[in-house]
Image: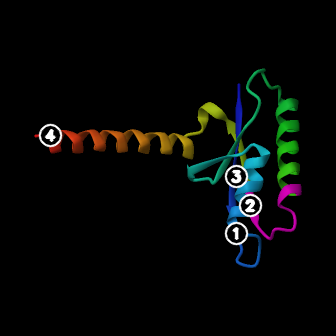
Amino acid sequence: MSYVTRVSIWFSSEGASPAIIIKKLLEMGFTLVRGAYDFVYYHDSTREMSGADLTTAILETANALHETLSGFNVHYTLATHPADEVGDFVPLDVIDEELKKIEEELQEIEKEETVS
């Protein structure tokens, strides 16, 4: 079973800019999402994770996140769940792809209307 860690970030006007925080999390392997959370991290799904493996993965992810965000004056929450139970976010690249398809369809409709 694969797992995903969801992260919410609370920014401070006295802290680092959102652009810096986003860049840092993307560099760590997090994915920007839209929904109840801001980022997700997909844990290695190439093997079955035992309870101990999952605990280690969560601790490593949490420690890495804490170290990366230290000094930036942001607050965050973490929640890790089986990936197949998660339905409260959509990766932004999926949304971007859908928007691209819609834009292409609209352009086709406009071409057809111009020809008519």
CA–CA distance in space, label 1 to label 2? 9 Å
Q: Which tag, 4 or 2, sits closer to the chain's start?
A: 2
Tell me, yes or no, whether the two marked residues, 1 and 2, touch with CB atoms within 8 Å.
yes
Q: Which residue is mark 3?
A: 7
Q: Residue furthest top?
A: 47
Residue 31 visible within the image: yes
**Residue carrying label 4:** 115
Q: Nearer the viewer, residue 41 or 97?
A: 97
- What's the residue at 84%, 37% (across, down)? 57
Front one among 38 and 109? 109
Amino acid tagged 2? Ile
Residue 21, labelled with which disc? 2
Label 1 belongs to which residue?
11
Q: Residues within 10 Å of mark 2 (few under 14, many from 20)?
A: some
Which label lies toward us, 3 or 4? Answer: 4
Decide: few, some or many residues near mark 1? Use Cα within 10 Å; few <14, some 14-19, many ≥20.
some
